Structure formats: C-alpha cells, structure tokens
Amino acid sequence: MAIFDSALIQPLAMQVTPPDWPGGYWWHWLFFTVAIIAFVLIMVMGAIYLERRGMGRMQSRLGPNRTGPFGLLQPVADAVKVLLKENIVPTTADKIVHWLAPVVAFAPVLVIFAVVPFQNGAMLADLNIGILYVVAVSSIATVGVFMAGWGSGNKYSLLGAMRNVAAVVSYEIPMVLAIVGVVIVSGSLSMNQIVTGQDIPYILVQPLGFLIFFIAACAEINRSPFDLMEADSELTAGFHTEYSGMKFAMFYLVEYAEAIAMSAIIATLFLSGWRGPWLPPWLWFIIKTFVVFFVMVWTRTTLPRVRIDQLMGLAWKFLFPLALINLFVTAIQVVVWPDISQWIFVIVNIAIAAVLILLWSKFFKLGQGRVEV
Amino acid sequence: MKFERYGIGIIKGMAVTIKHLLRHPTVTQFPDQRLNISRRSRGNELIWSREKCTGCATCAKTCPQGAIEIVTSTNMAENKYEVETYRVDTGYCIQCGLCVEACPYDALFMGYSYERAKYRRAELVQSNDELLESPSRPASGYFHPEIAETLPKQTLLVEKIVEKRKKK
Amino acid sequence: MEISSDKDYIYTSSELDYQEGQLIEEVKASSRESIQDPDAWLDEELKRNILLTSVDWVLDWARRSSLWTAICFPACCAFEFIAAEGPRFDMSRFGMEILRASPRQADLMITAGTLTWKMAPNVRRIYNQMPDPKWVIAMGACGISGGIFRSSYNVVPGYNKIVPVDVYVPGCPPRPEALIYAVQMLQKKIAKAKVVPDLSELPNPLRKGKK
Amino acid sequence: MTVAISAKEIISQLNTKFPGAIEEAGADSVLVKSDSLLAVAEYLKTAEGFKFEYLNYITAVDYYSYFEVVYQITSLESNRSVVLKARSYTRDNPTVPSVTGLWQGADFQEREIYDLMGITFEGHPNLKRIFLWDGFPGYPLRKDFNQ
Amino acid sequence: MTTTRELTLKTEPFVLNIGPVHPSTHGVYRMRCTLDGEVVVDIEPVFGYLHRGIEKLAEERTYTGFIPLTDRLDYISPMSNNLGYCMAVEKLAGIKVPERAEYIRVIMAELQRLANHCIAVGSMLNDAGAYFTPFMYTFRERERIVDLFDMVCGQRLTYNYMRIGGVSQDIPGEFLPALHKLVDRLTIFIEEYENLLKLNEILLARAKGVGILEKDTAINCGISGPVARASGIKWDIRRNDPYSIYDRFEFDIPTCENGDCYDRYRVRIEEMRQSLRILQQAMKQVPKGPVKADVPHLIRPPAGEAYAHIEAPKGELGYYIVSDNSIAPYRCHIRPTSLINLAALRQMVKGWKVADLIIIFGSIDITMGEVDR
C-alpha cells in the first residue's frame, strides 16, 4: 500500500488508450463520448422511471404504467413534451445569465462520466487523479444553479440558489475527506485502480466513510432529505421556478444526471464498481448504480426535509469531525499494519464507526432554532 | 436539539416504506377496473319521471339555489298541470339531493352515473326528455330504498385487505 | 438582531392593498362575457384523419401522456383531486402525479374550487404564465357556473369568464373517477386537435416569448 | 357543562362597579353601553371570581335601527360563560371600542366585522378590510346591501 | 433555544410573498413575509381569496337549504359543520332529536374527526418535506372512512347528511359491520404510522421546540382544539360542555405541555385513538328507532337567538343564529375555528426560518373555506 506511489509524483500523464483497445486514440474518444451521452440519457430515463414507479409503490400506488409497456415510455413522453413547450423568459430576468445557466449546470455533470470506469479500463480517460477531477468538476454545476437563481429575477429562485451554494460549499469538505480514506486504503487516485484494488468492497472497509460520503453526496446533489434548493413545499420550485420548456428540461436532466453520477461514483468507490461474479462487468456496474440510486429514492420517499441551519450543523459539527477521525484511523491502520488481512479492518472499522456515531450523537447539537428579531 | 436516537427512528421509518413496496398497491385502475359506487350515490345528474311528475314545483322551491326550472300549464280537461319544460343545469346543480328528498310523488331520482364531462358548457343544460331514465342514465337509490336494493353492493376499501394483519 | 427600522420598501402594505383592489376592479370590469369554449376542433375530425402524420402522432402522444398539473386549488374540489392523485385512484398511472408548483412548467390547470373576484387576477396570471400548449379543466359546479355560490357578491360565475375552458366536469365535487374520465376526454381532444398544422407555426424552442 | 351565566347573577356586581354602564340585562346577555364596554370587559376578564379570559367569538347583527355587537366570553377555570352586547345607533359611521388590547384573538374578527358590516372599532391597531378588496362598494352583511 | 445573533453584517430585510397559490398554504392563503435572509421578521396575513359570502347567502336560504352550504365551509370535515349548524337550529327551535339519530351523529362526527386528523397530520408532514408519503398513507385511510360516508349519504366530500331534528336517512344494514372492520384497521394503521415518523430524528429536529405557543397566548388569542390542547389547555367542549350524547362515553382528553409543532402532531394522533375508543363504545349501543324528528321542511323557529358550539376536529365551531320567525335565518354567524386559530401565527413564526414558517403553519391545520367563508 504505497501512498507515495509514483503516480502521484509523476506529471499528470493520461493513460488514454487502454491496452486491449483495438482502435486508435480518436476512435476511443469518439466512441466513449457518444457512449457516455447515450448512457447518461438512458440512465436518466431509467432513473426517472425507477423513481416514479418505486416511489409510487412505496406510497401504495402504482406509478406511471399506461404510457408504453409498463409505462416504460413515460420519461420519453415527458422529454418530448417538455422540449416542445413554449420557452418563457421573464421580463425581469437577466437575459444572458438566464440563458446560460442550464448549460453551465449541465456540462459538468456530463463531464464527470469521463473518468467513471464502466468495466476494466473502459472509460473515456483513465486520469491518474480521476477522483480529484470528479470532486473538482462536480461542484461547478453549482455555478449554473446560482446563475439560474440570480438570473431569474425571482426571490424564490434566489433563496433556493443561495441555499444550494451554502450546502455545496459545506458538504464538499466531509465528502473529500471521506474520499481520502478510500484513497489511502487503495493507494491510488485513479478510479480504475481503485476498483481493481477492491477485493473487499470498501463499504465494508470504510463503513463510516461510506456513510459520510453518501450523506454528503445526497446534500451536494440536493436529494432528499437535503433537497432544500427545490423544497417544493417552501419555495415552490426553487431555483428553476422561472424556467420552462427546454431549459427546464435541462435542469430536470441535471438533477437526475447528477444523481446517476453520484450513484456511479459511490458504486465505483465503495461497491467495487464493475467487479462481480457471473454477469458481465458493465452490467454489474449499472446494477450497482441503480441500487445506490434506489436507496436515494427510498430516503426521498421516507424522510422529511432538514432545515438550512440544521443542514449546515450536520456538515460542520457531525460529518466533518467524524470524517477527520475516520481519516486519522485509516491512516494509522494503513501505516502501522500494512500487511494485515483487510478482513480484520472490516470488523474493527465497523466497530469504530458504530462507537463513533453513538458517541458523537451524544454531544452533537443541531444548532439553535430561533433568532431574536 | 439533540440527535437523540442514533438514527433508529429513520431506520424504522424506512422499514415501513420498504414494506409498502412489497405489498400490493391499493389502486383501482379506473377505466379498466371500476369500483361499485355507493347504492345511494348522488351522481352528476338528475333523473325525472314525466309520468309521476305533477308539476307541483316543490323541487324548484326546495332547491337551495334554483337550478331547476319548471314551466307548467293547466290542462283543464284532465284537471291537472302539464309540465311544459323541466330544465336542470347540471353545471349549476350541486347534487345536494334536497329536491329528491322533498318530491312528494317520487318523481325525481339522483343519477347513478358520474361520467358526465362535456366539452361545451351548453351541453350541460338538460331539459325534458334528456332527463328521463334510460339504460345509460340509471337512477340511484338515494331516498329510494327499493332501487338501492337492486344496485350492486358497494366496494369498500376496508374489505380489501391490502396489508398483512397483525396477530391480536 | 438589528434591522434598519425605517422600512423603506418599494411599496407599503396599504399601497399594495390599493393596487390589488385596482387590479381586481380591472379584471372584474373586463370579464363580463364568458370566453367561448375552444371547440372548433370538434368539427374538424374528417380533415384531421387525412392530414395525420407520424410527427403529429408522436407529439400528440407525448403531450397527452404527460399532462403536468399546475397547482391552482382554491377549495373543496382540491380534495377530490388529491383523492384522484392518491393511492386509490392514482392518476399517476397517466403520468400526472407531477404537480408543478411553478406554472411555468405545467400543461394543465385543473380549476378545483370556487373562484372569487379577489382570486380572479391570480388565476388569470397563472394561466398566462403557463407555456403553450395549455389546457384547462373546469372541475365542479363552482368551476363551471359558480355553483351554489353564484348569487354571492364575491364569486365569479364560472372559470370561463377568466380563462378558456376545455372540459367541464359537473359534480359538487365530481368523483375522482369523473375527473379521470375528464382527463381522458382531454387526452382525446389533444389527440384530435391540430398540433402541428404548419411548420412555420411549430413552437420554436429558440423563440423568445415574453409573458 | 359550561354554565351560561344569566345577567341577573352578575348585574348587581356590575352595577355597583360601573353605575350606569349597563343598558339592559337580558335573560342570557348583558347589554353594555358602548363607551363603557372596554371597562366592563376588562373587569370581567381580570376580576377575581370572574376571570373570563377566553373570548369565544365576536359578531355583529344589523337590526336596521341599530347595530349590535355580540361578545361571548368564557372562563376556562370555572367553566362559565357570559354574553356581552353593545349597540351602535348610527348607520353612517357606527363605532364600538376595540377589545383587541384585552383579547388578541379579537383582531381578525373585528377586522372581519369592519369589512362586512362596516362597524369601526376604535383603537384597533390595523383596521382595514380583511376579506374584500380596497374599494369594494358597501358592506355586504348590512341588510340594505345591494349588489 | 433562543439566542441573539451577533450583528456583524448589516442586513436588509425584503418582502417575500407566499401565496395565494403556493403548494403548502392549504388553499389560497397569502402571507406577506418580511424576511431577513432566511429568518422571518414579520408576516402579514392576507385573507379573502376564498371569501364566498356564506353568511350573507345564509340570509337568502331556508334553514334546511343552508345545510349544503355548511358542507363547503370546512370542507375537510363537513359532517361536523352539519352537526354544529343543525344543533344551533334545534336549540333555537327547541327540537328533541331521536336517540338513534344522536348515535348516528356521534359516529359520523367521530369518523369525521378521524378523517380530518388524517389530513391534518399528513399535510403537516408533507409540509415538513416528506415527499407525499405520509400524506398518501393517511389519505388511503381517509378513503376508507370516506367510503362509509359515501355509503350513508351518497357523496364523498359534501355529505349534506344531517338534518334539523336528526339525519336525512337511516344507515344501511352493511354500515355497522364495515365500521367494525374500519375501527380494527385504523388501530393497526395508527401504530404503523407512528413507526413511520414518530421517532424520526429529522422530524424531531424540525418540529420539536419549533413554533412554541405559550398557554397564556393561546388563551388570549382564543385558540381552541388540538392546537390549544397541545399548549396544555385541557379544554374540550365534548367534556366541558357536553352536547349530543357525549356524556355517555368514556374518553380522555390528550394534552401536551410544550405547545410546539411536534406536540400538535402528537395530540392529533392521540385524539385519533380516543375517537376510535368512542366509536367502539358507540357502535355497540346504537338503538333502534326513528332517525329524524318530525320537522317541517320549511321550519320557522321562534324569534330569538342561539349559539351552539361543538368540538369540531379543528377546535370550537360555533353557529350564532338570529331568527325573526321567518323561513330564513335573520343572521347566521359562524365562529371560524381556523381564522381564530391563525391569530397567534404571527407571534409563533417570528424569528424562525422560512422552512419553519411552513411547518408551523401546517401544524395549525386550517382550511381556507372556513377562514374566508
């Protein structure tokens, strides 16, 4: 487990062509660009379908089942309809910002998938700093959201966008710290090598890290219970209140593409990515992505929304210290006992996680509620 | 505010939702599966019997808003009223059933059917022969127990056991 | 917390009230006549069958199978609407469980409840904020004619004074099944009505529309 | 059982405390002169033995020749209630003192009466129309209201 | 709980208009909120978007013809409204209601309380942000209750069932067996529902200690019903001023101490249990006999005035009727529970966040039909 691997010290060299790839450099790029766009669109449709059906069943209903077989074409119908709706720009809006916002929000989400391995080496660019790249790129979408909030000229939008920025800035820290735990164990920043190194899924080796990462990821992409920026019951539709037609479709797409991206990253980092018996690797990857996404749907169905100050309190007072402790413990384990079987760490880490959560719950306070006015 | 129970409440709640995922949903898929509605259902129309009606206009007087318009003329030969126009604006009627309750000659019935949406406002005004009972306009058993007996038993959601019952 | 005590907002509360009153009077004065039912398509059935193209069909299909409802539920009928959305009747089977709180993203306005003159400007505004193509279902007696409250001093006799209505559902309130039936009627209407009559009239996503 | 106190029981106490304030003592209500309403109400709310601290409702009735404002107040401790009434004999600008200072719950109800019946409550902090809009002609609950 | 925020930045309040069309204003309520960032500084409620002039319409209707209008007052609990109105007219005219009718009325009123609390609890949690799930579950249970109402009176929402001097029709034969099943079913359901959210940490954090209504304020504002009982006022008209036949049943009056949103939720759940208790006793005792006293359709009560109040699900619902011995009421005033319960809203929300404003508002449980009339 060499932390100071040469990969980190070397200049940022890209391993663009996996060894078993038949074509040349450009074919690789072209193929994966098309594949990623198709993958994202299809996965988003699948995700929307899964969410609406799953949520329907959890609410003792059925969910869409009349459009196409089993309602499978429902997302298609929605997409076609939304794209052809009239496009409205409010008169009070800042026109340019209003126009640019969906694009700025959408591009980074698509770009995240460049480093996600669909199977061994099958990715657009096997960056040796892949995970860093993900962290860097994924927060750019916030700029788009804030532009939307500002450019709409609507107070609801602005409130939603401000909430989102605050949440993303705070949750970036525990999220990165949770990732560092994984990086220390695997000894690499490359997504592909993290997967190849996962003989035991890291969800077992890093249970606390997984929990922190999952919560932080939910907050970053505004899934419930942290969906404050849309907050249906408070801010009508949050930052995209004033968007209609195609631009709204892009925000809708971003919402689910982000969820899929985060699910894919969680599947890669903690659920051993494409690895699995019997089935082809890419199928394993998709299944794991959907399983993670399903958990997000599940929490969304069950949990009420937290308040903005509680959201902040959770990040800084609960997740941040726990992530630091987790990082510290992992580092000690890796440095002091580099050669011990990881199964021992599994048991130890689960115990540590349980004790930490119990302890921290005792002195953790979610912050004050009322302010004197 | 302490984070008191270490997430046990959250886990309990999530167990409830996942249990619902595995249960059969409560849904009746309306156009294909139909519920038997109540025998006393006050459907979205009024049914009028020309034979029984004597043109006393009790219904029009009882109607809390005057949705019933009735025009009569005297038939001196048979010594009774002839109903010339009997008009109900279904879009104005609120189906309170007071007219049916008040009719002294059992000449009014609430309708049993509810699929009465229209594209045009004017189509909602029904008069004379449009108000008579026909196979497409069955009468309901509201204030007419003899009709209620002939109608199918109401589907009750209580009787559809969706959830597994606990042992007592 | 200290807040600048001189609350110099753009308008004071009483000015806002006054403006609202003016707006209501304006709407009231301009809505004496009912808006005609948009029913011209009913007679065009024959022509339509010949002109039907596959593009038309796909667009129609998409529009009728994802009708998102704007939130405009003033009164009682809202609960029958929620019942129709709820677990027993489940309108989500038609892809209708998405209630858009923002009218900018909605296609269908189900007018569930009594419309008062004070509310009328808001309803008209919601309707104007909805992007084309858009439809309105007048639900219940109050929505159709003012119902039991028609003789009141503050009630609009029917939504068709304010917005054009596509389908009227009688009942007070209509059963959820009746509402679902009306939605299906609306779907039939969308299937029959001309959607893409001409390429030049195709809703252009790049057009800058102002509302 | 909430005991409705008849005027006879409390009329003597009120008369000694506020001579001349009571206009009429009916079987189930006390008709108070509108200028001394506030004092009587405050006495009933705070005095030992009464403690009518809960205001059930306020309403107003138009009797053509006068407007009558009706207050029902209840004592939660002793479970008794009493009905107070005050009259205003003008039709142009009927005025009754506001009890908002005593019972905060009167706020919206007094605004409602002002809106629909046109009775001004003196001392109300924010007396403006509540249901209808600024510029609505007339007061609908008055008997002579014509649409 | 209450802390004073140190002033480091000079902040400028702004006005946010919530409503009249907003997902969580329970109808067409409007609040002009002055916000300082997320903190609510002041709110000014604006009513009247559903003002239909019911009190004026009553003067044009016959006594019986007004019953359909009472359905549309508080359209979540029409049976209670029917009952209150009929009791007021009976008090005015001195009519004795037959025994069987009294039992039927109590059964209906208690079923209505269950149905209303189902919606109240569900929509409050929906406002808290649980994505429709609690609402769907409670709505499903409400459907079961509504089925029974449909059976006896043929409508699902506007029942128009009670008449002056009794009820309009006798209950059908299959009603009581179905009621038995319903009571069993609801007992199970409440347990399950408690599992869903009773101990949910997020709900506790959101609702406990939020929107505290002090006992004195509650009394001063004339608050009644579950909101008052959550603040520790043991006041229930069914017990303190027994009407109909409530003095024959055993039941408790649940109260809480803190008067926060969570207590209001708890009180409603407990009241549902008590209602089930009343139903269990009532359905065993229903006697045989007529269901309506001999009252003419065009009843002319003697001149005079009467105030009858009942414990409606939302609080004290009263009808003040002045008769001049004609067929129509001379004046019919409705004590609007919802409007009076809103009187304390302004004090309750000051200093809380926007998200709290929504949940506090939801916990009061109002119906705009009753507020505006």
Image: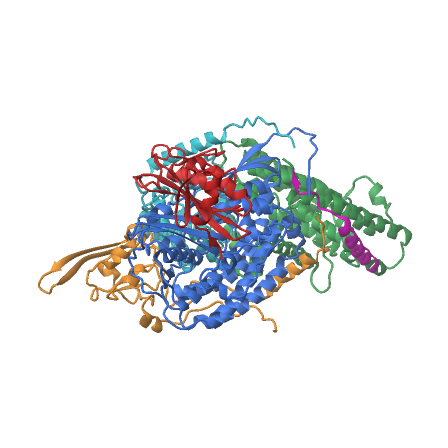
Chain colours: A green, B orange, C cyan, D red, E blue
Quarter of the image holding residue D87?
Answer: top left
Q: How many marks?
A: 0
Q: Is residue E364 magenta?
A: no
- Relative side of B149 to C72, left or right: left
Of residues C95 and E200, the one nearer the viewer is: E200
* Residue D78 pos. (x, y %): 54, 52
Q: Specify the quadrant that holds the C terminus of chain C.
A: top left
Question: Along the horizontal axis of the image, is E161 left or right of A343?
Answer: left
D138 vs E365, left or right, is: left
**Between residues E7 and E24, which one lies in front from this camera angle?**
E7
Instruction: Examine the rendering and report whether any part of residue C71 can be seen.
Output: no
By secondary structure, the bulk of the magenta-drawn segment is best described as helix
Q: Which residues are magenta?
A: A347-371
Q: Residue furthest right?
A: A336
Q: Is residue E73 above or below residue B29?
A: above
Residue under the point 67% across and 55% down:
A292
Residue A199 percent location from the top left of the image: 80, 59
Residue E333 at x, y percent in the picture: 39, 48
* Place of residue E140 in the rendered image (x, y in percent of width and height, measured from the top left): 51, 61
Question: Does the magenta segment cover residue A358?
Answer: yes
Question: Is residue D137 visible to the viewer in this orientation of the structure?
Answer: yes
Q: Quadrant of the N terminus of chain C?
A: top right
Is B92 displayed left or right of A63 in the figure? left
Along the line of sight, the residue nearer the viewer: E126 or C135: E126
Residue at far left of view: B77
